[in-house]
């Protein structure tokens, strides 16, 4: 009788154990773009996790933490999702989730919310994760099963998840029980490392959680066998997602009372729908009226022809009338579409054109959205001064514009190089990171009235190095007096002729100890002393190396329309320069003027401002810079005749 009783008890225990669900373990790695050992630890970790032996047992999430420091770039894998990432790795005292032991180094990991040592690992370092540790973690059964189905929405801009949870055993949580859903990109590859450790290939990167990582979906604290919970989630795809087809999800049930993960599941990436449309570029250059006629190029990356496309245009984010394109866009082919005339704001300077598209099919994908570009409105050729040193943080400068049809690397303002090393700011064209050979971008000066007087004089400082002897990046200067209907070339140099420094395979930055890496170009714009003049710098990309421009000046003797560089401003000196703090501004004027004197630092920040009354003849304005820090400053004198900028080096 005793033997029978023992048999029944053992059978009961066995049935209870086998009624539970096999576990999918969760491995969370805390890695980082600035973490030197992470770059070497991740490749073998990825191979281990991708092994056919382990994929049925464990699923991974990689959190790109700011250890030992946050990436300096404003965009990085960490920066795009820093709020969730910071919460996941930080202590409770620091406002985080509060894993124990704390996450204080990278790379390190957690298995099912616990230290890997619980399952036999020597430490939390990924190098100590192995097949045995994974098998041990997965051997514990779970009280839950999770089923998740996914579907693209009609525009492939979000993914809908349907989640079903069922209890296969009784369960009582220690604290709040949460279902967390993390969107990951399975594979990400960069041409240039986003951080400082050189890592360019990333796997299973967490990019967004739904509804948020912190809140998750609340579950009942107590569960009985057969209890279920079903819900749906709409998961919009973040704008910083690299490839939609790489999107997958990791879902898990976690007890926040003890941080243990009760069950996890993988929702694999899914191929894009058969209709796939790529926006290759959008082109709008310049307008002198209240309308633009943009041109866009689309490519069919799908498997079948597309016959109807609805294009929704916007100017400065304001919707214009949609346009319907009808035709045959065969699979693998491209088409360029000239849109109807649409209204534009009329204020001088840079404005934006953007668009999105709809297809008359159940689902589609705009796989690459290069659909927001700047253009120049030249409604008022006012003759404002042109003396640009890029001291102000705004880019493009006021009333300027840059065009970048394919939304790739282009013109930008930088703060690590300046003309002849007298400042640390300039504008840079990024040939180095631009793989689109033949890509043409423009930087437009403000619209100018150059009527009367002598031929205008354009000058600028440049620095450029080739990547190698075959690099043939090109810089040109064009001028138009008919609102861009035609352009006259005044300057064209490329490759070795353009270069001011020796070739380098590294991303070029002018040497701060070598002013010979800068050259000044002077161009006479013969025949363009006219009332409506546009000037543009045009680059043609050969994926060589970086180009820097600074101190762009446009002057004219005895002008009617233009005020900049009036004869009154030909005799302005700042001395001594460099200065130890006591500085004098010497100004020779033909008549009395009122003006404003301002000083900015290398970041474009205002550090001094004062009104000045200037007499005819010589004026001496004393400047006391002794309270300023050592560095380069820009002294700006603004008067009714125009504006003059002078650099001063403060050496204390």
Image (cartoon, helix red, strand yellow):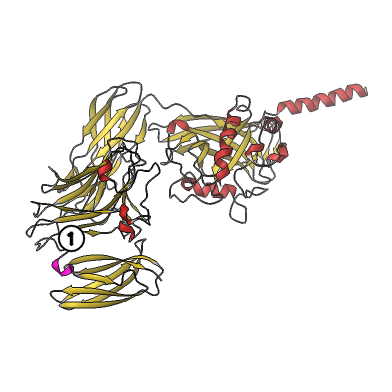
Magenta stretch, main secondary structure class: loop
Nearer-the-camera pick, 338 or 175? 338
- The reply to whether residue 229 is in sight is no
Q: On the image, which quarter does residue 600 sit in?
A: bottom left
Q: Which residues are magenta?
A: 562-570
- In the visual, does 295 lie left or right of 577? left
Indicate whether 431 appears above or below 413: above
**Circle 1 residue:** 384
Q: On the image, which quarter does residue 633 sit in?
A: bottom left
Nearer-the-camera pick, 392 or 103? 392
SS state under label 1:
loop
Nearer-the-camera pick, 3 or 159? 159
Indicate whether 162 appears above or below 455: above
Quarter of the figure that contains the C terminus: bottom left
Residue 449 percent location from the top left of the image: 12, 57
Name the residue located 47 percent from the left edge and 32 percent from the top edge.
246
Indicate whether 644 appears above or below 220: below
Residue 54 percent location from the top left of the image: 63, 28
Quarter of the figure that contains the N terminus: top right
- The reply to whether residue 67 is in sight is yes
Residue 44 percent location from the top left of the image: 59, 33
- In the visual, does 173 lie left or right of 46? right
Nearer-the-camera pick, 553 or 381? 553
Residue 590 percent location from the top left of the image: 13, 74
């Amino acid at each position: 009788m005793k033997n029978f009783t023992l048999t029944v008890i053992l059978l009961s225990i066995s049935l209870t154990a086998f009624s539970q669900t096999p576990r999918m373990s969760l491995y969370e790695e805390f890695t980082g773009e600035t973490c030197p050992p992470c770059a070497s630890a991740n490749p073998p970790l990825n191979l281990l996790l991708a092994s056919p032996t382990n994929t049925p047992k464990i699923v991974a999430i990689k959190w790109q933490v700011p250890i030992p420091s946050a990436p300096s770039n404003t965009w990085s894998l960490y920066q795009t999702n820093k709020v969730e990432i910071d919460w996941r790795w930080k202590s409770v005292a620091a406002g985080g989730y509060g894993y124990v032991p704390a996450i204080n180094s990278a790379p390190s990991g957690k298995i099912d919310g616990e230290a890997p040592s619980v399952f036999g690992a020597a430490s939390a370092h990924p190098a100590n994760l192995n097949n045995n540790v994974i098998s041990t973690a997965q051997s514990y059964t779970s009280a839950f099963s999770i089923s998740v189905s996914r579907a693209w929405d009609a525009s492939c801009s979000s993914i809908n998840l349907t989640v079903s949870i069922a209890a296969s055993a009784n369960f009582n949580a220690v604290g709040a029980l949460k279902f967390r859903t993390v969107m990951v990109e399975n594979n990400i590859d960069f041409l240039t490392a986003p951080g400082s450790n050189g890592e360019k290939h990333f796997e299973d990167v967490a990019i967004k959680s739904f509804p948020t990582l912190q809140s998750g979906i609340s579950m009942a604290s107590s569960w009985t066998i057969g209890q279920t919970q079903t819900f749906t989630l709409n998961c919009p795809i973040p704008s910083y997602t690299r490839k939609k087809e790489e999107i997958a999800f990791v879902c898990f049930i976690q007890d926040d009372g003890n941080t243990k993960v009760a069950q996890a599941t993988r929702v694999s990436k899914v191929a894009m729908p058969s209709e796939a449309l790529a926006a290759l570029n959008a082109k709008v250059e310049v307008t002198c009226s209240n309308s633009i006629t943009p041109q866009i190029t689309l490519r069919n990356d799908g498997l079948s022809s597309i016959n109807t496309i609805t294009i929704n245009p916007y100017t400065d984010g304001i919707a214009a009338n949609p346009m319907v394109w009808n035709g045959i866009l065969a699979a693998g082919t491209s088409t360029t579409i000239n849109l109807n005339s649409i209204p534009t704001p009329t204020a001088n300077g840079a404005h934006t054109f953007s668009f999105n598209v709809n297809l008359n099919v159940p689902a589609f994908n705009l796989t690459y959205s290069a659909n927001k570009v700047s253009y120049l409105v030249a409604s008022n050729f006012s003759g404002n001064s042109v003396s640009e040193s890029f001291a102000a943080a705004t880019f493009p400068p006021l009333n300027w514009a840059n065009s970048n049809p394919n939304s790739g690397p282009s013109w930008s303002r930088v703060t690590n190089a300046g003309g002849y090393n007298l400042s640390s700011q300039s504008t840079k064209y990024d040939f180095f990171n631009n793989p689109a050979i033949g890509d043409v971008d423009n930087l437009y000066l403000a619209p100018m009235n150059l009527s009367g007087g002598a031929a205008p004089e354009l000058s600028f400082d440049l620095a450029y190095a080739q990547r190698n002897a075959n690099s043939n990046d090109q810089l040109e200067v064009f001028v138009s007096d008919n609102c861009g209907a035609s352009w006259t070339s005044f300057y064209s140099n490329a490759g070795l002729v353009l270069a001011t420094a020796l070739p380098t395979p590294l991303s070029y930055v002018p040497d701060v100890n070598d002013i010979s890496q800068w050259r000044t170009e002077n161009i006479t714009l013969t025949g363009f002393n006219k009332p409506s003049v546009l000037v543009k710098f045009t680059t043609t990309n050969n994926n060589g190396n970086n180009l820097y421009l600074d101190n762009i000046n446009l002057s004219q003797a005895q002008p009617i329309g233009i005020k900049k560089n009036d004869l009154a401003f030909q005799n302005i000196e700042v001395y001594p320069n460099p200065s130890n703090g006591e500085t004098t501004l010497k100004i020779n004027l033909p008549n009395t003027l009122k003006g404003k004197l301002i000083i900015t630092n290398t970041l474009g920040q205002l550090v001094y401002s004062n009104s000045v009354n200037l007499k005819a003849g010589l004026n001496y304005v004393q400047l006391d810079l002794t309270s300023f820090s050592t560095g380069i400053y820009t002294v700006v004198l603004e008067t009714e005749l125009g504006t003059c900028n002078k650099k001063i080096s403060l050496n204390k």
